[in-house]
Amino acid sequence: MPKRATKKPATHSLPPCCTSGADGAVRHALKVEPELKKSNLVRLRRIEGQIRGLQKMIEEDRYCADIMIQISSVHQSLRSVSRRLMQNHLRHCATHAIKSGTDAEAEDMYRELVDLVFRHCR
């Protein structure tokens, strides 16, 4: 089977406070609220359990519709984590880049936000 071409992720030049590493390839949030981090980790562990449950359902040849309902539940759980991460990103990283960054940094953030919204809507 031929390999599909992988799309390279867009790179954005953000303020130094949002990046780390020699070449800036590894980026970190400007700020993550501790309660958000804790609750997202709990949610992701729960999702991990849901995925294991899906694997078991498939191994056991469970009814397709039942599996699809569980998959829908996992999607909703991931969307919940994503929404909360987007709120944090807007509140801290995006706000900082737009208010305190250069015009180019602000423009990169606008582009990143549009990319995230449209990627999320697919």
Image (cartoon, rainbow, N blue to C red):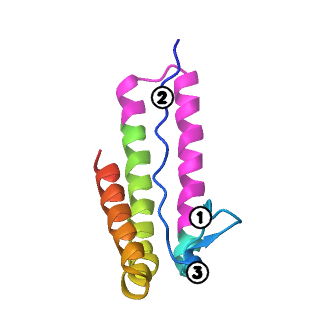
**For the residues marked 3 and 1, what is the alpha-carbon distance in whole angstroms?**
11 Å
**For the residues marked 1 and 2, what is the alpha-carbon distance in whole angstroms?**
32 Å
Q: Which of 94 and 8 is in front in this view?
A: 8
Question: Upstream in the sequence, badge 3 or badge 1?
Answer: 3
Depth check, mark 1 against mark 2: the one in front is 2
Please name the residue that numbered disc 1 is placed on. 41
Question: Upstream in the sequence, badge 3 or badge 2?
Answer: 2
Q: Which of 10 and 36 is in front in this view?
A: 10
30 displayed left or right of 88: right
Q: Residue 82: image x %, image y %?
A: 42, 60
> Which element carries disc 2, helix, strand or loop?
loop
Magenta span main SS:
helix
Q: Does the magenta stretch include residue 65?
A: yes
Q: How crowded is mark 1: few (under 14 residues within 10 Å), some or many (20 or more)?
A: few
Q: What residue type is labelled 2?
A: Ala
84 displayed left or right of 20: left
Q: Residue 117: image x %, image y %?
A: 31, 58
At horizontal 39% and vertical 73% (from top left) the residue drawn is 104
Tell me whether the residue at label 3 lies in contact with that at label 2, contact meaning CB atoms closer than 8 angstroms.
no
Q: Residues within 10 Å of mark 3 (few under 14, many from 20)?
A: few
Magenta span covers which residues?
Answer: 40-68
At horizontal 42% and vertical 39% (from top left) the residue drawn is 70
Q: Which amino acid does label 3 sit on?
A: Pro
At horizontal 49% and vertical 57% (from top left) the residue drawn is 11
Q: Residue 99: image x %, image y %?
A: 37, 87
